Image: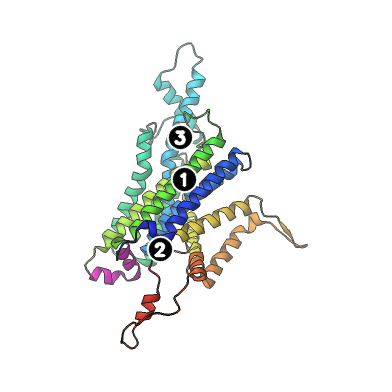
Amino acid sequence: MTRIPLIRRPDVLAVLVGLTVLTLLATIGAEMGLVSTSFVKTLGKTLCLCLVAVAMDLVWGYCGILSLGHMAFFGIGGYAIGMWLMRARTEDIVAAQLANRPLPPTPEEIDQAAATQIFGVVGSDQFPWMWVLSDVLAVQLIAVVLVPGLLALIFGWLAFRSRVTGVYLSILTQAGTLALSLWLFQNDSGLRGNNGLSGLQNIPGLTHVPQSTLSLWFLWASAIALAATYILAAWTVSGRFGSVVRGIRDDEARVRFLGYDVEGYKLVVFTGTAMIAGVAGALYYPQAGIVNPAEIAPIASIYLAVWVAIGGRGHLWGAILGAAAVSLLSSWFTGGGAPDIDLGIYVVRWTDWWLVLLGFGFVAVTLLAPEGLAGLILRLTRRRPDRIGDMGPDKGALRREEASAEPAE
Protein backbone atom coordinates (compact mmCIF):
# COMPACT_ATOMS: atom_id res chain seq x y z
CA MET A 1 0.00 0.00 0.00
CA THR A 2 1.42 3.36 -1.02
CA ARG A 3 1.61 5.86 1.80
CA ILE A 4 -0.49 8.93 1.03
CA PRO A 5 1.42 12.18 1.73
CA LEU A 6 0.07 13.71 4.92
CA ILE A 7 -0.33 17.08 3.23
CA ARG A 8 -2.94 15.47 0.96
CA ARG A 9 -4.94 14.00 3.79
CA PRO A 10 -7.92 16.26 4.56
CA ASP A 11 -8.37 14.76 8.04
CA VAL A 12 -4.84 15.79 9.08
CA LEU A 13 -5.37 19.32 7.78
CA ALA A 14 -8.79 19.54 9.45
CA VAL A 15 -7.43 18.41 12.82
CA LEU A 16 -4.49 20.82 12.73
CA VAL A 17 -6.66 23.75 11.66
CA GLY A 18 -9.31 22.87 14.23
CA LEU A 19 -6.80 22.69 17.07
CA THR A 20 -5.21 25.98 16.04
CA VAL A 21 -8.55 27.78 15.83
CA LEU A 22 -9.72 26.31 19.15
CA THR A 23 -6.62 27.34 21.07
CA LEU A 24 -6.53 30.80 19.49
CA LEU A 25 -10.18 31.48 20.27
CA ALA A 26 -9.79 30.18 23.82
CA THR A 27 -6.67 32.30 24.35
CA ILE A 28 -8.26 35.46 22.98
CA GLY A 29 -11.47 34.81 24.90
CA ALA A 30 -9.58 34.24 28.15
CA GLU A 31 -7.51 37.39 27.70
CA MET A 32 -10.67 39.41 27.09
CA GLY A 33 -12.44 37.86 30.06
CA LEU A 34 -15.04 36.12 27.90
CA VAL A 35 -13.88 32.58 28.73
CA SER A 36 -13.47 31.45 32.34
CA THR A 37 -10.38 29.70 33.64
CA SER A 38 -12.43 26.64 34.54
CA PHE A 39 -13.70 26.33 30.96
CA VAL A 40 -10.17 26.68 29.59
CA LYS A 41 -9.14 23.83 31.88
CA THR A 42 -12.12 21.82 30.65
CA LEU A 43 -10.96 22.34 27.07
CA GLY A 44 -7.41 21.34 27.97
CA LYS A 45 -8.57 18.19 29.73
CA THR A 46 -10.81 17.36 26.79
CA LEU A 47 -7.83 17.51 24.42
CA CYS A 48 -5.96 15.12 26.72
CA LEU A 49 -8.91 12.71 26.58
CA CYS A 50 -8.88 13.04 22.79
CA LEU A 51 -5.20 12.12 22.88
CA VAL A 52 -5.81 8.89 24.80
CA ALA A 53 -8.78 8.19 22.51
CA VAL A 54 -6.44 8.30 19.50
CA ALA A 55 -4.25 5.75 21.29
CA MET A 56 -7.30 3.58 21.94
CA ASP A 57 -8.35 3.81 18.30
CA LEU A 58 -4.90 2.69 17.18
CA VAL A 59 -4.94 -0.38 19.41
CA TRP A 60 -8.62 -1.27 18.93
CA GLY A 61 -9.85 0.35 15.73
CA TYR A 62 -6.78 -0.51 13.68
CA CYS A 63 -5.18 -3.50 15.43
CA GLY A 64 -8.37 -5.11 16.73
CA ILE A 65 -7.23 -5.36 20.37
CA LEU A 66 -10.09 -4.27 22.64
CA SER A 67 -8.00 -3.13 25.58
CA LEU A 68 -10.00 -2.39 28.72
CA GLY A 69 -6.94 -1.15 30.56
CA HIS A 70 -5.53 1.80 28.67
CA MET A 71 -6.86 4.30 31.20
CA ALA A 72 -4.56 2.57 33.68
CA PHE A 73 -1.59 3.78 31.63
CA PHE A 74 -3.26 7.19 31.55
CA GLY A 75 -3.42 7.20 35.35
CA ILE A 76 0.16 5.98 35.72
CA GLY A 77 1.35 8.94 33.69
CA GLY A 78 -0.59 11.20 36.02
CA TYR A 79 0.90 9.58 39.11
CA ALA A 80 4.43 9.85 37.68
CA ILE A 81 4.26 13.61 37.15
CA GLY A 82 2.09 14.07 40.24
CA MET A 83 4.81 12.67 42.50
CA TRP A 84 7.20 15.42 41.43
CA LEU A 85 4.56 18.14 41.57
CA MET A 86 3.41 17.23 45.07
CA ARG A 87 6.87 16.67 46.52
CA ALA A 88 8.49 19.78 45.03
CA ARG A 89 5.54 21.97 46.04
CA THR A 90 5.46 20.56 49.58
CA GLU A 91 9.20 21.02 50.01
CA ASP A 92 8.88 24.68 48.95
CA ILE A 93 6.13 25.21 51.53
CA VAL A 94 8.10 23.45 54.27
CA ALA A 95 11.28 25.39 53.46
CA ALA A 96 9.36 28.68 53.72
CA GLN A 97 7.87 27.63 57.07
CA LEU A 98 11.25 26.62 58.52
CA ALA A 99 13.08 29.66 57.19
CA ASN A 100 12.19 31.72 60.29
CA ARG A 101 14.06 29.39 62.62
CA PRO A 102 17.30 30.68 64.24
CA LEU A 103 19.26 28.06 62.32
CA PRO A 104 18.49 27.39 58.64
CA PRO A 105 16.99 23.95 58.02
CA THR A 106 19.14 21.21 56.52
CA PRO A 107 18.04 19.35 53.38
CA GLU A 108 17.40 16.29 55.55
CA GLU A 109 15.06 18.26 57.81
CA ILE A 110 13.15 19.64 54.85
CA ASP A 111 12.89 16.16 53.37
CA GLN A 112 11.64 14.70 56.65
CA ALA A 113 9.08 17.46 57.17
CA ALA A 114 7.82 17.10 53.59
CA ALA A 115 7.45 13.34 53.97
CA THR A 116 5.48 13.82 57.18
CA GLN A 117 3.18 16.35 55.57
CA ILE A 118 2.56 14.20 52.48
CA PHE A 119 2.20 10.78 54.10
CA GLY A 120 0.90 11.75 57.54
CA VAL A 121 -2.62 11.15 56.20
CA VAL A 122 -1.79 7.43 55.85
CA GLY A 123 0.16 7.21 59.10
CA SER A 124 3.71 7.45 57.76
CA ASP A 125 6.53 9.97 58.00
CA GLN A 126 8.92 8.51 55.42
CA PHE A 127 9.09 8.60 51.65
CA PRO A 128 8.46 5.11 50.17
CA TRP A 129 11.13 3.54 47.99
CA MET A 130 9.42 4.58 44.76
CA TRP A 131 9.80 8.24 45.76
CA VAL A 132 13.60 8.09 45.92
CA LEU A 133 14.08 10.14 42.74
CA SER A 134 10.69 11.84 42.73
CA ASP A 135 12.34 15.22 43.35
CA VAL A 136 14.14 15.02 40.00
CA LEU A 137 11.86 16.33 37.25
CA ALA A 138 13.79 14.69 34.40
CA VAL A 139 13.43 11.26 36.02
CA GLN A 140 9.69 11.67 36.48
CA LEU A 141 9.22 12.87 32.91
CA ILE A 142 11.00 9.75 31.70
CA ALA A 143 8.82 7.67 34.01
CA VAL A 144 5.70 9.18 32.39
CA VAL A 145 6.61 7.31 29.20
CA LEU A 146 8.83 4.49 30.45
CA VAL A 147 6.65 2.99 33.20
CA PRO A 148 3.45 2.61 31.09
CA GLY A 149 5.54 1.37 28.18
CA LEU A 150 7.38 -1.19 30.28
CA LEU A 151 4.21 -2.51 31.90
CA ALA A 152 2.52 -2.76 28.50
CA LEU A 153 5.56 -4.50 27.05
CA ILE A 154 5.62 -7.13 29.78
CA PHE A 155 1.86 -7.68 29.73
CA GLY A 156 1.69 -7.75 25.94
CA TRP A 157 4.62 -10.14 25.59
CA LEU A 158 3.05 -12.60 28.01
CA ALA A 159 -0.43 -12.31 26.48
CA PHE A 160 0.42 -12.24 22.78
CA ARG A 161 2.97 -15.03 22.85
CA SER A 162 0.30 -17.17 24.53
CA ARG A 163 -2.03 -16.35 21.62
CA VAL A 164 -4.66 -14.81 23.91
CA THR A 165 -7.12 -12.94 21.68
CA GLY A 166 -10.66 -11.61 21.51
CA VAL A 167 -12.82 -11.34 24.57
CA TYR A 168 -10.31 -13.29 26.65
CA LEU A 169 -7.68 -10.63 26.07
CA SER A 170 -10.18 -7.90 26.94
CA ILE A 171 -11.02 -9.64 30.21
CA LEU A 172 -7.32 -10.06 30.95
CA THR A 173 -6.62 -6.34 30.45
CA GLN A 174 -9.61 -5.49 32.63
CA ALA A 175 -8.45 -7.86 35.37
CA GLY A 176 -4.98 -6.32 35.33
CA THR A 177 -6.46 -2.84 35.60
CA LEU A 178 -8.67 -3.89 38.50
CA ALA A 179 -5.69 -5.42 40.33
CA LEU A 180 -3.68 -2.23 39.88
CA SER A 181 -6.50 0.01 41.14
CA LEU A 182 -7.12 -2.21 44.18
CA TRP A 183 -3.43 -2.09 45.02
CA LEU A 184 -3.38 1.70 44.75
CA PHE A 185 -6.34 1.94 47.13
CA GLN A 186 -4.17 0.46 49.90
CA ASN A 187 -2.55 2.97 52.23
CA ASP A 188 0.77 1.10 52.10
CA SER A 189 0.99 1.28 48.30
CA GLY A 190 3.28 4.29 48.61
CA LEU A 191 0.90 6.61 46.74
CA ARG A 192 -1.37 7.74 49.60
CA GLY A 193 -4.08 5.16 48.98
CA ASN A 194 -7.58 6.50 48.41
CA ASN A 195 -6.37 10.07 49.05
CA GLY A 196 -4.32 10.07 45.89
CA LEU A 197 -2.05 12.97 44.98
CA SER A 198 -3.57 16.43 45.27
CA GLY A 199 -2.65 20.05 44.71
CA LEU A 200 -1.20 19.21 41.30
CA GLN A 201 -2.43 22.47 39.78
CA ASN A 202 0.24 24.30 41.80
CA ILE A 203 3.36 24.15 39.63
CA PRO A 204 6.62 24.47 41.64
CA GLY A 205 8.61 27.53 40.65
CA LEU A 206 5.58 29.10 38.98
CA THR A 207 3.57 30.09 42.04
CA HIS A 208 3.69 33.70 40.87
CA VAL A 209 1.90 32.77 37.63
CA PRO A 210 -1.91 32.92 37.97
CA GLN A 211 -4.03 29.87 37.22
CA SER A 212 -5.62 31.70 34.30
CA THR A 213 -2.23 31.81 32.57
CA LEU A 214 -1.21 28.29 33.55
CA SER A 215 -4.46 26.92 32.17
CA LEU A 216 -3.68 28.50 28.79
CA TRP A 217 -0.17 27.05 28.81
CA PHE A 218 -1.53 23.58 29.47
CA LEU A 219 -4.19 24.07 26.80
CA TRP A 220 -1.53 24.83 24.22
CA ALA A 221 0.68 21.96 25.42
CA SER A 222 -2.27 19.56 25.16
CA ALA A 223 -3.11 20.83 21.66
CA ILE A 224 0.50 20.43 20.50
CA ALA A 225 0.72 16.91 21.94
CA LEU A 226 -2.54 15.92 20.24
CA ALA A 227 -1.47 17.41 16.90
CA ALA A 228 1.94 15.71 16.99
CA THR A 229 0.41 12.37 17.96
CA TYR A 230 -2.24 12.61 15.26
CA ILE A 231 0.37 13.30 12.59
CA LEU A 232 2.49 10.38 13.80
CA ALA A 233 -0.51 8.05 13.97
CA ALA A 234 -1.78 9.10 10.53
CA TRP A 235 1.67 8.58 9.01
CA THR A 236 1.98 5.18 10.68
CA VAL A 237 -1.36 3.73 9.57
CA SER A 238 -1.11 5.05 6.02
CA GLY A 239 1.85 2.86 5.03
CA ARG A 240 2.83 -0.79 5.05
CA PHE A 241 2.79 -1.00 8.84
CA GLY A 242 -0.80 0.20 8.90
CA SER A 243 -1.79 -2.31 6.23
CA VAL A 244 -0.33 -5.19 8.22
CA VAL A 245 -2.00 -3.98 11.41
CA ARG A 246 -5.38 -3.75 9.71
CA GLY A 247 -4.79 -7.21 8.29
CA ILE A 248 -4.21 -8.52 11.80
CA ARG A 249 -7.48 -6.94 12.86
CA ASP A 250 -9.41 -8.50 9.98
CA ASP A 251 -7.79 -11.95 9.77
CA GLU A 252 -4.93 -12.61 12.15
CA ALA A 253 -4.42 -16.21 11.04
CA ARG A 254 -4.00 -15.24 7.39
CA VAL A 255 -1.45 -12.53 8.21
CA ARG A 256 0.51 -15.03 10.28
CA PHE A 257 0.33 -17.53 7.40
CA LEU A 258 1.83 -14.89 5.09
CA GLY A 259 4.91 -14.85 7.31
CA TYR A 260 4.44 -11.65 9.31
CA ASP A 261 5.41 -11.50 12.97
CA VAL A 262 1.88 -10.89 14.26
CA GLU A 263 2.89 -10.87 17.91
CA GLY A 264 5.63 -8.32 17.21
CA TYR A 265 3.27 -5.95 15.42
CA LYS A 266 0.68 -6.23 18.18
CA LEU A 267 3.32 -5.65 20.84
CA VAL A 268 4.59 -2.50 19.11
CA VAL A 269 1.07 -1.06 18.85
CA PHE A 270 0.11 -2.00 22.41
CA THR A 271 3.31 -0.61 23.93
CA GLY A 272 3.34 2.55 21.83
CA THR A 273 -0.25 3.42 22.62
CA ALA A 274 0.40 2.84 26.33
CA MET A 275 3.17 5.46 26.14
CA ILE A 276 0.81 7.89 24.42
CA ALA A 277 -1.75 7.29 27.18
CA GLY A 278 0.93 8.04 29.79
CA VAL A 279 1.73 11.39 28.15
CA ALA A 280 -1.98 12.23 28.01
CA GLY A 281 -2.33 11.51 31.73
CA ALA A 282 0.71 13.62 32.58
CA LEU A 283 -0.92 16.58 30.84
CA TYR A 284 -4.42 15.91 32.17
CA TYR A 285 -3.94 15.68 35.93
CA PRO A 286 -2.07 18.96 36.52
CA GLN A 287 -5.17 20.56 35.00
CA ALA A 288 -7.52 18.40 37.07
CA GLY A 289 -5.52 19.05 40.25
CA ILE A 290 -5.81 15.54 41.69
CA VAL A 291 -5.26 11.92 40.73
CA ASN A 292 -6.54 8.95 42.76
CA PRO A 293 -7.07 5.21 42.23
CA ALA A 294 -10.67 5.73 41.10
CA GLU A 295 -9.25 7.22 37.90
CA ILE A 296 -7.66 3.84 37.09
CA ALA A 297 -10.70 1.69 37.82
CA PRO A 298 -11.86 -0.54 34.91
CA ILE A 299 -14.97 1.60 34.36
CA ALA A 300 -12.74 4.43 33.10
CA SER A 301 -11.32 2.21 30.35
CA ILE A 302 -14.83 1.07 29.44
CA TYR A 303 -15.84 4.73 29.05
CA LEU A 304 -12.83 5.18 26.78
CA ALA A 305 -13.98 2.33 24.55
CA VAL A 306 -17.47 3.88 24.44
CA TRP A 307 -16.03 7.23 23.32
CA VAL A 308 -14.12 5.60 20.47
CA ALA A 309 -17.12 3.48 19.46
CA ILE A 310 -19.38 6.55 19.38
CA GLY A 311 -16.84 8.54 17.39
CA GLY A 312 -16.13 5.71 14.98
CA ARG A 313 -13.28 3.27 15.48
CA GLY A 314 -10.91 2.88 12.60
CA HIS A 315 -11.02 6.65 11.99
CA LEU A 316 -8.47 8.61 14.00
CA TRP A 317 -10.46 11.82 13.71
CA GLY A 318 -13.57 9.90 14.73
CA ALA A 319 -11.91 8.99 18.03
CA ILE A 320 -11.23 12.68 18.64
CA LEU A 321 -14.81 13.55 17.73
CA GLY A 322 -16.26 10.95 20.08
CA ALA A 323 -14.05 11.82 23.04
CA ALA A 324 -14.59 15.56 22.63
CA ALA A 325 -18.36 15.24 22.24
CA VAL A 326 -18.82 12.97 25.25
CA SER A 327 -16.39 14.93 27.44
CA LEU A 328 -17.96 18.32 26.75
CA LEU A 329 -21.50 16.99 27.05
CA SER A 330 -20.58 15.29 30.32
CA SER A 331 -19.21 18.57 31.69
CA TRP A 332 -22.38 20.36 30.61
CA PHE A 333 -24.85 17.81 32.01
CA THR A 334 -23.01 17.05 35.26
CA GLY A 335 -21.83 20.62 35.86
CA GLY A 336 -25.32 22.07 36.09
CA GLY A 337 -25.40 23.53 32.59
CA ALA A 338 -28.39 21.45 31.50
CA PRO A 339 -31.61 22.63 33.19
CA ASP A 340 -33.62 20.14 35.20
CA ILE A 341 -36.93 18.98 33.70
CA ASP A 342 -39.95 19.08 36.01
CA LEU A 343 -42.43 16.39 34.96
CA GLY A 344 -44.79 17.12 37.82
CA ILE A 345 -44.47 13.77 39.56
CA TYR A 346 -40.73 13.59 39.00
CA VAL A 347 -37.87 16.01 38.38
CA VAL A 348 -35.25 14.85 35.90
CA ARG A 349 -31.86 15.96 37.18
CA TRP A 350 -29.21 15.45 34.54
CA THR A 351 -26.47 15.00 37.10
CA ASP A 352 -28.21 11.72 37.99
CA TRP A 353 -29.32 10.72 34.50
CA TRP A 354 -26.25 11.59 32.43
CA LEU A 355 -24.83 8.06 32.43
CA VAL A 356 -28.22 6.67 31.40
CA LEU A 357 -28.31 9.16 28.52
CA LEU A 358 -24.78 8.16 27.55
CA GLY A 359 -25.82 4.51 27.53
CA PHE A 360 -28.80 5.22 25.29
CA GLY A 361 -26.55 7.24 23.01
CA PHE A 362 -24.10 4.37 22.74
CA VAL A 363 -26.89 1.91 21.89
CA ALA A 364 -28.40 4.31 19.34
CA VAL A 365 -25.07 4.86 17.59
CA THR A 366 -24.37 1.12 17.57
CA LEU A 367 -27.75 0.31 15.98
CA LEU A 368 -28.17 3.27 13.65
CA ALA A 369 -24.56 4.08 12.78
CA PRO A 370 -22.33 1.03 13.42
CA GLU A 371 -19.29 2.97 12.14
CA GLY A 372 -19.94 5.75 14.64
CA LEU A 373 -20.32 9.44 14.03
CA ALA A 374 -17.37 9.40 11.66
CA GLY A 375 -18.99 6.77 9.47
CA LEU A 376 -22.25 8.73 9.49
CA ILE A 377 -20.49 11.92 8.45
CA LEU A 378 -18.62 10.12 5.68
CA ARG A 379 -21.83 8.62 4.32
CA LEU A 380 -23.48 12.04 4.29
CA THR A 381 -20.59 13.86 2.64
CA ARG A 382 -18.91 11.30 0.41
CA ARG A 383 -19.85 11.53 -3.30
CA ARG A 384 -19.55 8.61 -5.70
CA PRO A 385 -18.87 9.10 -9.41
CA ASP A 386 -21.99 8.61 -11.55
CA ARG A 387 -20.15 6.84 -14.34
CA ILE A 388 -17.17 4.54 -14.16
CA GLY A 389 -15.20 3.53 -17.26
CA ASP A 390 -14.68 0.04 -18.59
CA MET A 391 -13.72 -2.28 -15.77
CA GLY A 392 -12.84 -5.22 -18.01
CA PRO A 393 -14.67 -8.21 -19.42
CA ASP A 394 -14.90 -10.35 -16.27
CA LYS A 395 -18.58 -10.97 -15.55
CA GLY A 396 -19.41 -10.81 -11.88
CA ALA A 397 -16.07 -9.22 -10.94
CA LEU A 398 -15.98 -6.62 -8.21
CA ARG A 399 -13.79 -4.23 -10.14
CA ARG A 400 -16.49 -1.58 -10.35
CA GLU A 401 -17.06 -1.63 -6.56
CA GLU A 402 -13.32 -1.59 -5.90
CA ALA A 403 -12.78 1.36 -8.22
CA SER A 404 -15.49 3.42 -6.58
CA ALA A 405 -14.44 2.59 -3.03
CA GLU A 406 -12.61 5.21 -1.04
CA PRO A 407 -9.12 4.29 0.22
CA ALA A 408 -9.07 3.18 3.84
CA GLU A 409 -7.54 5.47 6.40
Q: Name the residue under label 2.
A: 61
Q: Can residue 124 be seen in this view?
A: no
- N-terminal of the pair, mark 2 or mark 3, is 2
Binning the other alpha carbons within 10 Å of mark 3 as few (below 14), some (14 to 19) or many (20 upward) gives many
- N-terminal of the pair, mark 1 or mark 3, is 3
Q: Is residue 188 above or below residue 207?
A: below
Q: Amino acid under label 1?
A: Ser
Task: Measure the C-alpha gap from mark 2 to mark 3.
Answer: 35 Å
Magenta span includes 346: no
Task: Measure the C-alpha gap from mark 1 to mark 3.
Answer: 18 Å
Binning the other alpha carbons within 10 Å of mark 1 as few (below 14), some (14 to 19) or many (20 upward) gives many
Q: Amino acid under label 2?
A: Gly
Q: Mark 1 or 3, which is nearer the eye?
A: 1
Quadrant housing the N terminus: bottom left
Magenta span includes 247: yes
Q: Mark 1 points at which residue?
A: 222
**Main SS type for the magenta part?**
helix
Residue closest to the eye, 96 or 108: 96
Quadrant housing the C terminus: bottom left
Label disc, if present, on residue 85 of the rendered structure: 3
Residue at 57% x, 41% y: name it: 28
**Residue 252, position as x, y percentages in the image:** 30, 69
